[in-house]
Structures are given as structure tokens and as C-alpha cells.
Amino acid sequence: MPDKIWVHSGDAHVLEPADLWHERMTAEMAERMPRSEKVDEHTEVLHVDGRSFERKIGRNPVMTEDDLRAAGALVEGSAHRQVGMTFTEMGGFGRPPGAWDVELRLRDLDHEGIWGEIVYPSIGLWNGLIKDPVLYRDGVQVMNDWLKETFIDITPRSIPAAEVSSRSVDDAVAEMNRVAGLGFQAVSLPATLDADVPNWNHDAWEPLWATAEEIGMVLAVHIGSDAQDPTNPAGVSYRGPGGAVLNWVETAFGGQRATAMLVASGALDRHPGLRVLVSEGGATWVPFMADRMDEAYRQHGVYVRPKLSRLPSEIIYDQVYASFQHDRSAVQAYLAMGYRKVMWGSDYPHIEGTFGHTQHIVHELFDDIDESARYQMTRGNFLELFPTVGEPPGGGRRPAQDD
Ligand code: MN
């Protein structure tokens, strides 16, 4: 094995324990929080606040347990066993996997060469579908308290992203202030909002941006966290030829739209200290989006409101970070396109991620590139957002700066 390259991950998840809501909420409310139910080996149903959505269960065609064992990468009892399982089943083995047991999780991270990570929910990515503002407000409080007990109280290596309501800006601001007091450094925002709430470019959200900047809270947008009915045939769910690939492509767009809204509306311009992380969506879209917005800002200038103090490209290059897991093009966004906020991410323990083959991927991506660029993508950018994670002990140093 070549030397381990220690990385921080701009994309990881925890699995909400199935009994969390029932332990801390009334049964009536707990029943309405997002949960999944397995129908058959290919299908699960998500239940959210009285509505139900069927979705296909992902399978990993690349790494089987035998593949992992042959590669010497099998960690017994760990999260690779999620393959072909619902979110809920991931936690259902005799020994709980790292999906929600922090001790096992840290063992997995050590094995993979991942030191720090931001941690998103799993089922909570569908929180934006909750219609009842009281359920949303109380449910995310329960989740955030559990995240504090599970991560912040236990290890400085995992940075949990707190959830806040996307139905009420007042509730979102109050919860953001509350979790800052608990030690949170990031809040997770749905990439796409429900159709009946003001979009991210709307001035209604201004108090949230002002608060986040004031208290230094990173806005973390995970792709696929779209408050849209995934079974609506008029929506973004594809069947037939290419469906699986098309659906995966589709997940990327929500994070791109949210970012464009934050830039074009002037939210990031008014709050230059505000920083956004878009996780799991790749990175090459940022230079594309920068060019696209600059073109509109210039060519359609007579229609453009509000005017910005900087070009959209300057704002997005400065304040928006983007994490990717496998894309070779993401490295080129940094090297060839001058977009420096590129961040590697593992997506642990989900199937799109690199669990079981992290070092293989990281070596493939970064072995042949300049040391300072490699450092920035593997750890430096993460530490700009979350400096408390620090460097892995003995796991590498910051290269001498050449600029
Ligand atoms: Mn992810």
C-alpha cells in the first residue's frame, strides 16, 4: 500500500436512530417525522408528515463485500453493509455500524485516512417536505440535540450540520442562534425549497443570512435535499432508458440553483463573511455558473436587480465551496480554471461515496499534482471553514506556501 494521504471530508452522513423521535416527541408528532419503510428488496417508502413517497433502494455495483475483503479494506460490522438496504436498515445489525455509532465511525475514518468531516443527516435530507411549521421547528431541535450529544460532546473530528426550519425564517434564526451556543459551526439548508415557501433569493431570508454571517455559521447545502415529491411524474423522477443516471444527474441541479440564488440576489454580496458549502455536487459547475452569471450580469445589465458590488464570478469564487468524491474534472476546476474552493468529500457511509476505497481514489486523484493544490483540496479548504478540526496527528503538514 502507498502512504496514506490524510484528508478531511466535505460530505458525510449520520443515520438518525429509528426511535429518536419517539423518545423525545409525542407519538403523534414522532409518527410524522421523516422515516423510511422497506417494501421489498428494491423499494422503500419515505413517510413525511402524512405523505408517502416510494423510492428505489440503491445498490453499489462496484464494491461488494468480497471486493472489499480482497482489497484488504473490509472492516467487519461496518457501514459498507448498507448496500441494498434502506436507510433504517443500515443501523439494524448486531453491532451498530459507523453510520450512527461514533466509536465505529472513527475506526472507519482512521482506516480510510479521513480525519475531519462535516456530517449531514440521512433521512433528514427530506425535512424540507415537512409542511407543519411546528413539527419542523420541534423536530430539528430534537435532531440537533442528538447531534450535539453524538458528535460535539464526543469528538472534535466530526462537524455535524444542524438542521433549521425552511418554513419559518424566525424559527430558522432562533434555532441557528441556539445551536451556535451548543457548538455547531454549520447549518444544513435544503437545496430546493417547497413550492409554497419563498425561494432562497427572496428577501424574506435576509435575517438568516445576517445571523449566519454575524455568528460565523457556514451554510451547508447537500445536493438531493430537494423538497419535491420524488414520485411526481411531472417532477424530476425519470424512468425508462437511462433513468438511474438521469436521476443522479438531476440531484446536482438543486445545489447549483440555490447557489445561483444566493449570488444573484445579492445575499452573499451583502454578507461577504458568509460562506456556503455545496456538498456532493462536484466542482466544475462553479466555473460554469460563474461565467453564466457574469454573462447575464453584463449582457442583460439593464434588467439586473440588485446591482452587486462585485461580479457574480468574484462572489462565487470567494464564498462558495464545493465538494466532490470521484470527479477527475473537479481537480481541474482548481488547477485549470482558477476555482480554488474545491474540497474533497467521502460521502461516508452512502453508496455514492468512497467508503472501502478512499485511499485508492485519493491517490488516483491527487498523486500527480502540485503539493499545495493537493493540500488545499484535501484539507486546507475544509480547515478554512472548520479550523477546530485541526490537522491529523502525524498525518501530514501544511506545505510551505509559495504565494
Ligand atoms: Mn453526501
Image (spheres, grey):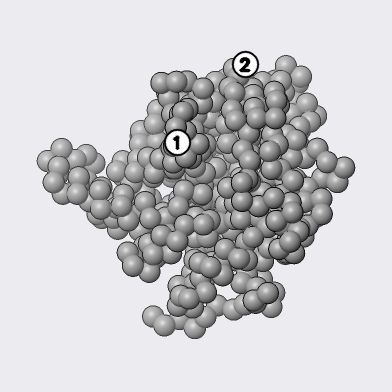
Q: Tell which tag, 2 or 1, sits nearer the viewer.
A: 1
Q: Which mark is residue 50?
A: 2
Real-space Cα separation, disc 2 to disc 1, in angstroms: 31 Å
Residue in the image at 52% along x and 80% along y: 399
Determine the image quadrant of residue 55: top right
Determine the image quadrant of residue 159: bottom right
The reply, left or right, for residue 326 in relation to residue 197 is right
The quadrant of the picture occupied by the N terminus is: bottom right
- Dot 1 lies on which element? loop
Q: Is residue 371 above or below residue 219?
A: below
Q: Is residue 44 above or below residue 200?
A: above
The quadrant of the picture occupied by the C terminus is: bottom left
Q: x, y percentage for residue 392?
A: 66, 71
The reply, left or right, for residue 286 in relation to residue 239 is left
Label 2 near ligand 1 (CB < 8 Å): no
Is the residue marked by circle 1 packed among few (<14), some (14-19), or many (20+) residues within 10 Å? Answer: few
Q: x, y percentage for residue 132?
A: 57, 20
Q: Which mark is residue 242?
A: 1
Residue in the image at 37% along x and 62% along y: 333
Disc 2 residue type (three-letter): Gly
Q: x, y percentage for residue 382?
A: 54, 62
Residue furthest to the right? 94
Disc 1 residue type (three-letter): Gly
User: Which of the two labelled residues, at mark 2 and mark 1, occupies the earlier sequence position?
Assistant: 2
